[in-house]
Image: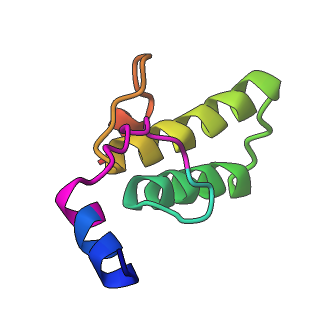
Amino acid sequence: MNEADSLQAANRNPVPVPARPWAPQFDAISPRQEALALQFSIALCGGERPDAVRVLEMARALYEAEAMDAGQRPSSTPLAERVE
């Protein structure tokens, strides 16, 4: 069997690829993330001094926003739904 025959055989009998669960990319910004980043920036410029819990809430909201824009739904109640 030559290479062309091997490729044709592989195309007729493709190996199923398992679906991978969604995972954050951390290399791009989604529209919801952009809106959240703007809100956070305005709050910080306005004098807000977030404590550790607030910083974690901001990070969680950015994660959830990316998931929602990717068509996924995080398992918890999304904070990112507050952004319109």
The image shows residue 51, relative to residue 23, as above or below, that is: above
Q: Nearer the viewer, residue 29 or 79?
A: 29
Q: Residue pushed farthest front?
A: 1
Judged left or right of residue 18, residue 44 is right
Q: Nearer the viewer, residue 15 or 47?
A: 15
Name the residue at 36% across, 44% down. 17
Count the numbered circles shown.
Answer: 0
Instruction: Inspect the magenta stretch and tell me whether residue 48 lies in it.
Output: no
- Residue 33 in the image: state x and y as whole percent: 49, 54
Name the residue at 60% across, 57% down. 42
Q: Nearer the viewer, residue 53 or 78?
A: 78
- Residue 81 in the image: state x and y as whole percent: 34, 35
Quadrant the N terminus occupies? bottom left
Judged left or right of residue 40, residue 75 is left
The image shows residue 11, relative to residue 56, as above or below, that is: below
Name the residue at 43% across, 39% down. 20
Looking at the rendering, the stretch of residues picked out in magenta corresponds to 10-24
Magenta region, mostly helix, strand or loop?
loop
The image shows residue 64, relative to residue 47, as above or below, that is: above
- Residue 6 in the image: state x and y as whole percent: 34, 71
- Residue 58 in the image: state x and y as whole percent: 62, 37
Q: Nearer the viewer, residue 42 or 57?
A: 57
Name the residue at 42% across, 37% down. 80
Q: Residue pushed farthest left?
A: 12
Instruction: Inspect the magenta stretch and tell me whether residue 23 lies in it.
Output: yes
